[in-house]
């Protein structure tokens, strides 16, 4: 077989379908967030304003976080030096896990190299090991949860997105004596909608199910201490597992689960993706810990963030740029056409100094192609005005429909 020919043919299919991904070559500038340098192929660079970062609160450049990482590198060096079991457990990991357990009001926490790995390993392990367990999974769950569920080879039922009635119907059809697990998210990344957590817990409890929530897009952001939507709603204790990332609002990297000490010890003891992988660098753990601590105490940033989100929505409304209404910080600007979506994003980057990645199929359904805008507390009034004016220009050039407010 000519392997490269095969790879090329497959890649060409992506090109033809308009699904080929091109990365923007960016250099983030600490102290100037959300500004970055963007490198062109010829090596030249220009300044852009990033409008699609998941570093929602700019914590990736916060002095506390940078300071904690510098100091941990100076005192502990770079890598962890092993898996957690074999010489890799550093005091910073232990401290971080205590911090996370406290954040979610749980007995224990376990950190992983990423949020993806945490979902994959935790769901993969729980669902493979609990005898005959059935998994009920929201139709729009993240790829990392889907892969974990698939890896476990357990029985699964997919319930309609955020539809607790459908969940109830599916659960009622199964043997009441079979162990069950319900897996869902709080804030869904692409539409920015939020799950009816309490209603889902009510249904799950009726059937004695384990409740697993991914709060990746909510931790650091919602709740009186940044514990997520479940914290805001005062129902963290109703969830058996709260999973999160250290790579989005906390601005560093890594993932985690929190739960009872038995559950966490179980995953720690049986999850291959945890056991056989080198621990996070101590400096990463120290940075994440500083970020969590800062956000626990300092919630003004979250209020400022909400204000900016409102300002962006108002600026879009003033120009009739359609965006999906939702109760979160994610502003999906609806283009509804893959080619136009990519074209607008390219021109914004090249000519307007605005970076917002197009979101096309298969990430979202055909016909709902969009620009997923994530305002941060550090976007200025001028940034917002420039974003809205640029979109307004391009909306006309693409002959896209406007929405009358
Ligand atoms: C990004 C994401 C993850 C994975 O987290 P990482 O730390 O980036 O690996 C998990 N769940 C959801 C819903 C996500 O959007």
Image (cartoon, grey):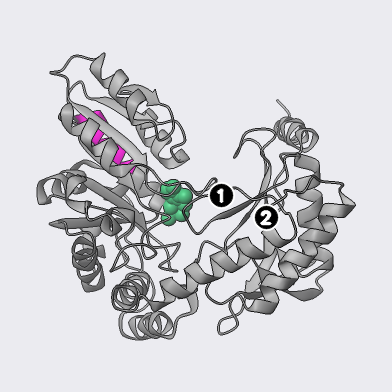
Q: Residues within 10 Å of mark 1 (few under 14, many from 20)?
A: some
**Where does the N terminus fall, quadrant-wise?**
top right
Q: Could you say where residue 28 lies in the image, as x and y percent from the top left?
A: 61, 74
Residue farthest left in this picture: 262
Residue 317, horizontal then vertical, whole percent: 68, 58
Q: Nearer the viewer, residue 74 or 388?
A: 388
> In the displayed structure, does residue 154 sit left or right of residue 85?
right
Which residue corresponds to mark 1?
325
Write the residue at 17% across / 51% down: 237
Q: Is residue 371 visible?
A: yes
Give the magenta part as a residue range. 121-129
The residue that label 2 is drawn on is 357
Residue 300 rendering spot, x and y as whole percentages: 39, 78
Mark 2 Cα shell of 10 Å, populated few (<14), some (14-19), many (≥20): many
Q: CB at mark 1 closer than 8 A to ligand 1? A: no
Note whether 396 is above or below 19 in the view shown: below
């Amino acid at each position: 077989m000519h392997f490269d020919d095969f790879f090329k043919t497959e890649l060409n299919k992506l090109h033809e379908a308009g699904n080929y991904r091109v990365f923007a070559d960016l250099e983030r500038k600490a102290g100037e967030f959300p500004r970055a340098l963007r490198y062109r192929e010829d090596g030249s660079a220009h300044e852009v304003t990033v409008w699609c970062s998941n570093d929602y609160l700019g914590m990736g450049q916060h002095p506390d976080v940078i300071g904690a990482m510098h100091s941990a590198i100076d005192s502990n060096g770079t890598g962890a030096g092993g898996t957690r079991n074999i010489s890799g457990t550093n005091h910073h990991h232990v401290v971080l896990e205590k911090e996370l357990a406290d954040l979610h009001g749980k007995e224990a926490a376990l950190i992983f190299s990423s949020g993806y790995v945490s979902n994959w390993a935790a769901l993969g392990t729980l669902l493979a090991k609990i005898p005959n367990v059935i998994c009920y999974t929201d139709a729009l769950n993240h790829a990392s949860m889907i892969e974990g569920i698939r890896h476990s080879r357990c029985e699964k039922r997919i319930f309609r997105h955020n539809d607790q009635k459908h969940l109830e119907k599916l659960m009622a059809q199964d043997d009441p004596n079979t162990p069950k697990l319900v897996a869902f998210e709080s804030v869904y990344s692409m539409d920015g909608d939020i799950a009816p957590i309490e209603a889902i817990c009510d249904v799950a409890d009726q059937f004695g199910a384990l409740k697993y929530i991914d709060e990746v897009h909510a931790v650091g952001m919602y709740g009186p201490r940044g514990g997520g939507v479940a914290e805001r709603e005062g129902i963290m204790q109703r969830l058996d597992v709260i999973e999160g990332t250290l790579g989005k609002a906390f601005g560093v990297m890594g993932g985690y689960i929190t739960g009872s000490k038995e559950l966490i010890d179980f995953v720690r003891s049986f999850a291959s993706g945890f056991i056989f992988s080198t621990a996070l660098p101590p400096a990463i753990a120290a940075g994440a810990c500083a970020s969590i601590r800062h956000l626990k105490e300092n919630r003004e940033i979250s209020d400022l963030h909400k204000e900016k989100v409102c300002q962006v929505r108002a600026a879009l409304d003033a120009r009739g740029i359609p965006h999906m209404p939702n109760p979160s910080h994610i502003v999906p600007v609806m283009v509804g056409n893959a080619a136009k979506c990519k074209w607008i994003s390219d021109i914004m980057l090249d000519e307007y100094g605005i970076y917002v990645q197009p979101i096309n199929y298969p990430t979202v359904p055909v016909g709902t192609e969009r620009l997923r805008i994530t305002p941060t507390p550090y976007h200025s009034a001028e940034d917002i005005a420039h974003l809205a004016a640029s979109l307004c220009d391009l909306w006309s050039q693409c002959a896209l429909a406007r929405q009358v407010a």
